Image (cartoon, rainbow, N blue to C red):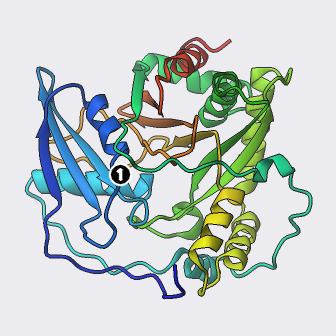
Amino acid sequence: MDGTPPAFYRTDRSIALSSATGPWQEQAGKELGRAFDPSNGPLMRVVQTDDENGTTLVLTLEHCIADAMGAMYVLRDLVTALNGGALEPTAAPPSLEDLIADRIGRAPMPDLTGIDPRMTIPLDDQPFDGSPAVIRTFALTRDETTRLVQRCRAERATVNSLIVAAASRSCAAIVGTDYIRVFNPIDLRPILDAGESLAPTFGAIRLGFEAHGSTRLWDRARAVRAQTAGAKSEAAVASAAAVSNHFLPPAVTASEVRRYIHQAIDYELLVSNLGAPALDWAGPVRPRAIWGPMVMGRYPGEHMVGVTTFDGSLRVTVAAHKDPAPLLFELEEATRTPQ
């Protein structure tokens, strides 16, 4: 952050593997409270927990080396190795800025004067002090997942837009704010033809909602779907890259990065939905369930919703600094028995 271009360094150290007892949610919560030392890799940890249902692996990766979809490729490679398959090294990917410029082109700096000022109010950072996050989960059956998808289609919405709509309505009351900001990541790999890169290859849309608005749930879900679809266009991706390049030039300082993050990323709610990743799980060793993604931005009152559909079953995790049971209840009601 002192003007030196970013770089990654090889290490001879192995990825840390530890064993633990107790529910995997408890171990994942502890991992979310632990910082990485970026000067002393690897920037990944694995915790193994065993119970009567089998073995659960908690994979924790520093966000600078991987995003949620990238973590899925790590899991896929791990399963391949456990089945005796060979893994070939891949070349380092280009920067996201170069990838966007190569695939789409560069865009001029957009006009930002019309942004609601409430979207840029900074939040205080909470340090990584070892305090664990609290994680709650639920899963839909295959039949329930199928009915949910069908209902969303009938309502001209998506599962993601329904979850964002339901979570934002509930989370505002839980956090106690009149205006809630939602950060909704978007996987850019299909848009940029980026392949299966581990490196962070995502954009995002930030949405703002009045906490006490009277908008019906499905109306809000349809509005979220429309805004999200717009953010996935090539023009929108190039425009977002222009903003990042403007505020984060090569000689950027740490204070400038911090200011940009607080103005462009701060949120009360993060919803990350991986959909149903189409990965090859060939071999006798394979996951029976996949939960996540989970991440905490170290903001006071933040809630994080992670969604993954695996083997036809939608699974939801909710992480927060305090027990997120109220939000979990609202999400389960909205997805299991959508009204």
Q: Quadrant of residue 30?
A: top left
Task: Please provide percent x and percent y for residue 304.
Answer: 52, 37
Task: Please provide percent x and percent y for residue 147.
Answer: 55, 19
**Please, which residue is most extreme toward the right here?**
114
Viewer-nearest residue: 311 or 101: 101
**Whether residue 94 is situated above or below residue 333 in the rendered picture:** below
**Whether residue 114 is situated above or below residue 193 in the rendered picture:** above
Q: Amino acid at mark 1?
A: Met
Whether residue 295 is visible to the viewer of this picture, yes or no, is yes
Helix, strand or loop at label 1? It is helix
The quadrant of the image that shows the C terminus is: top right
The tally of labels here is 1
**Residue at coordinates 16% horizontally, 56% vertically from top-left?**
16
**Residue at coordinates 67% horizontally, 65% vertically from top-left?**
259
Report the residue marked by disc 1.
72
Quick check: 104 left or right of 281? Answer: right
Viewer-nearest residue: 213 or 222: 213
**Residue at coordinates 52% horizontally, 48% vertically from top-left?**
297
Quick check: 89 left or right of 219? Answer: left
Whether residue 156 is visible to the viewer of this picture, yes or no, is no
Quick check: 203 left or right of 116? Answer: left
Task: Please provide percent x and percent y for residue 246.
Answer: 72, 78
Q: Quadrant of residue 213?
A: top right
**Whether residue 5 is situated above or below residue 129 in the rendered picture:** below
Q: How many other residues sit within 10 Å of disc 1, few (<14), some (14-19) or many (≥20)?
A: many
Viewer-nearest residue: 118 or 96: 118
**Residue at coordinates 60% horizontally, 87% vertically from top-left?**
251
Quick check: 152 left or right of 309? Answer: right
